[in-house]
Amino acid sequence: MKNEIKSTVKRGRPVNPTSERQIRLKELDKKRKMGLLKRGRPVDPTSERQVRLKELDAKRKNGELKRGRPSNPNSARQIRLAELAAKMKANGGKMPLGRPKSTKLSIEKLDIKLVDGSTLGIIAV
């Protein structure tokens, strides 16, 4: 039963090929195949929006268009970033992370002999 070919029966309401709607649909289909049927709302090339879009496209191609909001060089954040960049430049391009290293202390144990013969252990830093 899986390999059987079933005959297709046209379902639904019968179509009258000479009706106005069917004639109009056939004409639209012919125009669509020939490429004469335009879809959507036509574009006015002289409109304000289209002129602006052309200018933006030209700026993009020339590399003149900057993206985003321009930064204020006098803002607190930009000043802080400039200071960090100066620190990095002073350190050879590396930014020191975390807290500064502390100096290591050397600990030595001293044994001091007292007069009575006992020893006193002192830790010297």
Image (cartoon, rainbow, N blue to C red):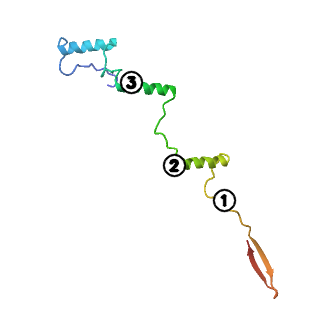
Percent position of residue 102, x then y: 67, 62
Q: Is residue 82 above or below residue 56?
A: below
User: Alpha-carbon neighbours of circle 1 within 10 Å: few (<14), some, or many (≥20)?
Assistant: few
Q: Is residue 84 above or below residue 110?
A: above
Seen at 25% across and 12% down, the residue is: 27
Q: Quadrant of the N terminus?
A: top left
User: Alpha-carbon neighbours of circle 2 within 10 Å: few (<14), some, or many (≥20)?
Assistant: few
In this rendered view, identify the residue nearer to me: 6 or 56.
56
Seen at 17% across and 20% down, the residue is: 13
Mark nearer the N terminus (2 vs 1): 2
Residue at numbered disc 2 = 77
Mark nearer the N terminus (1 vs 3): 3
The label number, if any, that marks residue 115 in the structure image: none
In this rendered view, identify the residue nearer to me: 113 or 64.
64
Determine whether the residue tagged by mark 1 lies in a helix, strand or loop.
loop
Q: The disc labelled 2 sits on which kind of residue?
A: Arg
Q: The disc labelled 3 sits on which kind of residue?
A: Val
Percent position of residue 94, x then y: 64, 48
User: Alpha-carbon neighbours of circle 3 within 10 Å: few (<14), some, or many (≥20)?
Assistant: few
Residue 21 in the figure: left or right of residue 65: left
Mark 1 vs mark 3, foreground winner is 3
Residue at numbered disc 3 = 51
Residue at numbered disc 1 = 101
Seen at 47% across and 27% down, the residue is: 59
Seen at 71% across and 64% down, the residue is: 104
Q: The disc labelled 1 sits on which kind of residue?
A: Lys
